[in-house]
Image: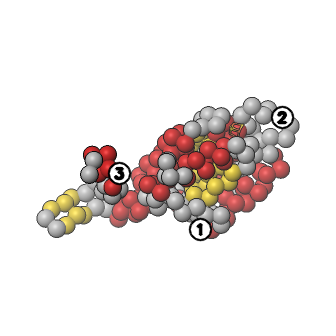
Amino acid sequence: MSENQKQIDKPTVAEPPEGVSGQGFFATSFEKAVGLARKNSLWPLPFATSCCGIEFMATMGAHYDLARFGSERLSFSPRQSDLLMVMGTVAKKMGPVLREVYIQMAEPKWVIAVGACASSGGIFDTYSVMQGIDRVIPVDVYVPGCPPRPEQIIDGLMKIQELAGNESLRRRHSQEYEDLMKKYNIE
Ligand code: SF4
């Protein structure tokens, strides 16, 4: 078997969090164990409205393979997803729809704005296009590009993994988070 084939066949194993290990045991904090599970099982909801969505299709294909990150299970129901990926030009008319989708997602949830349009309206500085989805929902990671390549989308997902893996279990109950939600008029 060639070295390359051995590399491909090697199972992907998640890195363990910081902890104490000895013969036959490994101990870590509850927060880190939860973070490990969350970061390696993000379920994306693809909210794709135009061309950036096509790049996402490539990201899901065998070559880039989002399954390597535990994120192959796409959800088209907000209640069974924790990562909202907004890809494409978002018209102002779609704003309330996007907001509703976000509100219906259960906590903890994260958001990626994929590409220039979702991040800032892109080249469409017109009366009908929303100049960035952060006008209606909070965004955790912005992926630049028009369109971004699949590598960039994967980089964005890995940034979310970093946030999810290191997030304090108390964050969603903090004053700071409540204030953020209030800013968007979300109860
Ligand atoms: S950023 Fe570019 S590729 Fe992506 S939706 Fe906008 S125009 Fe299309």
Q: Secondary structure at mark 2?
A: loop
Helix, strand or loop at mark 1:
helix
Choose the circle earlier in sequence order: 1 or 2. 1
Q: Type of residue at label 1?
A: Gln
On the image, which quarter does residue 169 sit in?
Answer: bottom left
Residue at x 41% of width, y 62% of height: 37
Does ligand 1 reach within 8 Å of label 3's beta carbon? no
The residue that appears at 72% across and 56% down in the rendered structure is 99
Q: Is mark 1 within 8 Å of ligand 1?
A: no
Examine the rendered structure and indicate whether residue 27 appears above or below residue 54. Answer: below
The amino acid pointed to by label 2 is Thr
Residue linked to disc 1? 80
In front: label 1 or label 3: 3
Query: Alpha carbon of mark 1 to alpha carbon of mark 2: how far?
Result: 34 Å
- Could you tell me which secondary element the residue under label 3 belongs to? helix
- Which residue sits furthest front? 1
Mark found first going from the N terminus, 2 or 3: 3
Left or right: residue 125 compared with residue 172: right
> What amino acid type is highlighted by mark number 3?
Ile
Q: Of residues 7 and 132, which is closer to you in this image?
A: 7
Q: Residues within 10 Å of mark 1 (few under 14, many from 20)?
A: some
Residue at the (13%, 65%) spot, across then down: 23
Q: Quadrant of ligand 1?
A: top right
Asked if ligand 1 lies within 8 A of label 2, the reply is: no
Q: Tell me the quadrant of the picture where the C terminus can be found.
A: bottom right
The percent position of residue 15, horizontal first and vertical second, equals 32, 54
Residue occupied by mark 2? 126
- Camera sees residue 139: no
Residue labelled with disc 3: 8
Locate residue 72, reporting x and y percent.
52, 59
Hey, which quadrant is residue 100 in on the image? bottom right
Q: Decide: few, some or many residues near mark 2? Use Cα within 10 Å; few <14, some 14-19, many ≥20.
A: few
